[in-house]
Amino acid sequence: MSDSPTSNGPLLVPSAASPAPERRTYLIVDGENIDATLGMNVLGHRPNPEERPRWDRIVDFAQNLWGQPVTPLFFLNASSGQMPMAFVQALLAMGYRPIPLAGSGSEKVVDIGIQRTLEALDSRAGDVLLASHDGDFIPQVEGLLDDGDRRVGLLCFREFVNARFTELASRGLGFYDLEDNAGAFTTMLPRVRIIPLEEFDPLRYL
């Protein structure tokens, strides 16, 4: 006598469960804000090419920070109708997704685009690293922090961050310095700031 099933219907083999999508970090770069803060507050002049961040190092830092893949989004203001194509090509080569936004002269197109992106991430699993000092994003960052399973960080020059961001540290917002933590610059910046003793490295000043 056969051991085969006696039912007339086809033999149903349970399908393997689909693997959960790999958790990732969404790196959101406010290029205008980083450039303006570097130029006006740190250098005191428009940054020269060699003084600007190494954006590839920032992607590497974001990947290593939480040990997971990164989706790097770089927001640009293209309201003039022109794009800095050489820079856009360089961003693409480094794995960024450039997002050039255009609007009327009175619109803060980059800020609005980033706000919408942070709001969209509120309903998506993943961690968020925002490169900016702009307090316009505080409501969206607060919303992301409400998800206790999500890591949220600010990549910045700590001494120039909007003070209201500092208040979110107690809710889990992490702060990562563009120079000290991300190593985004090839030369030491002329910053005068309070240095915690445990972070003081005299060799940097000799």
Image: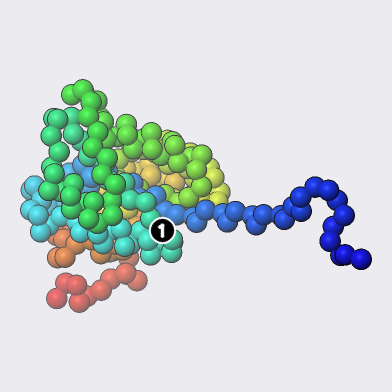
The part of the image, by quadrant, that contains residue 103 is top left
Furthest residue in direction front, as rendered: 1
Determine whether the residue tagged by mark 1 lies in a helix, strand or loop. Answer: loop
User: Residue 156: x percent and y percent?
Assistant: 29, 52
* In-image side of 74 versus 153 (left or right): left
* In-image side of 187 versus 145 (left or right): left
Can residue 14 be seen here?
yes
* In-image side of 102 versus 138 (left or right): left
Q: Residue at x 37, y 61 (%)?
A: 63
Where 132 sits versus 109, above or below? Answer: below
User: Residue 177: x percent and y percent?
Assistant: 30, 58
Furthest residue in direction right, as rendered: 1
**Residue tagged 1:** 69
Q: Residue at x 31, y 62 (%)?
A: 60
Q: Residue at x 22, y 29 (%)?
A: 102
User: Residue 22: x percent and y percent?
Assistant: 50, 56
Return the residue nearer the eye: 188 or 27: 27
Quadrant the N terminus occupies: bottom right
Can residue 178 be seen here?
no
Q: Residue at x 72, y 55 (%)?
A: 13
Return the residue nearer the eye: 54 or 190: 54
Crowd band around label 1 with a 10 angstrom C-alpha radius: few (<14), some (14–19), many (20+): some
The part of the image, by quadrant, that contains residue 162 is top left
User: Residue 206: x percent and y percent?
Assistant: 14, 76
Kind of residue sitting beneath label 1: Pro
Please give the count of numbered marks on the rendered protein: 1
Return the residue nearer the eye: 124 or 133: 124
Task: Tell me how the rendering is colored.
Answer: rainbow
